[in-house]
Image (cartoon, rainbow, N blue to C red):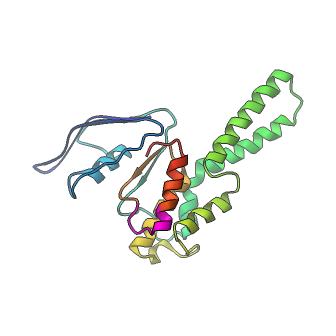
Amino acid sequence: MLSARNLKLSFGARTILDDASLALLPKDRIALVGENGVGKSSLLAILAGEPADSGLVELAKDTRVGILRQVPELMSGDSVVTAVRSAMEHHLLDIANHENLCTDLANPLDENARARLAGRIDRLARKIESNGGFDVDYWVERVLTRLGISAREQEIGTLSGGERRRVDLARVLLMAPDVYLLDEPTNHLDIEAIQFLVEVFSSTSSAV
């Protein structure tokens, strides 16, 4: 679903990546391990779409990538709820499409057309359920609560660094991407929040 070939990256005379290649498949769980400054964050950023000096990153069709950066890139004037819900565009679109298909099913259809439409509805419903379900407000509240985020309407710009990191993690989880790229995801998390991450990533078919 995601592959990188022959990535090269240098900062001045220092080579960070030299012909780095990898491939990610559904359900892959890969840990990127190395000392500070060796290029882990740079590699994740390139996999998420930032340019390398050379090399190629390819995504399978319709593959969505979510990245948790060490320094969140959130709009300081947004509320916590606005920031995390902004990542749910695809999920909300799936719910709207499901409603439209159910409406179409009420129209007069021949048996074959009805069976095809019912199959599409079933597949879309399973996708929606796997990404948090139809009750968006409940899922948002559950993720924020399990990550220990008490603020809801507070502006991002007023939060501490650790709070912003947890909000950004909530954003990525609610996005439910096909590929999670997580840069030190357990920073600023307590045991309960880490256990929630284990639950989420144990049940998803996305690559992590």
Q: Is residue 114 above or below residue 54?
A: above
**In this rendering, position of residue 27 left or right of residue 110:** left
How many numbered marks does the figure carry? 0
**In this rendering, position of residue 110 left or right of residue 168:** right
- Residue 208, image x, y percentages: 43, 46
The quadrant in which residue 71 appears is bottom left
Residue visible at 55% across and 75% down?
A: 151
Residue visible at 71% across and 33% down?
A: 120
- Residue 202, image x, y percentages: 51, 48
Residue visible at 80% across and 40% down?
A: 102
**In this rendering, position of residue 87 left or right of residue 109:** left
Is 132 contained in the magenta span?
A: no
**In this rendering, position of residue 92 left or right of residue 164:** right
Q: Is residue 158 above or below residue 89?
A: below
Q: Quadrant of the N terminus?
A: top left
- Residue lying farthest to the right in this orientation: 108
Write down the region rendered in magenta: 186-194
- Residue 191, image x, y percentages: 46, 67
- Residue lying farthest to the left in this orientation: 13
Q: Decide which of 187, 190 is in the foreground and name it.
A: 190
Residue visible at 21% across and 56% down?
A: 35
- Residue 77, image x, y percentages: 50, 71
Q: Decide which of 38, 7 is in the foreground and name it.
A: 38
Q: Is residue 75 visible to the viewer in this orientation of the structure? A: no
Q: Is residue 67 visible to the viewer in this orientation of the structure? A: yes
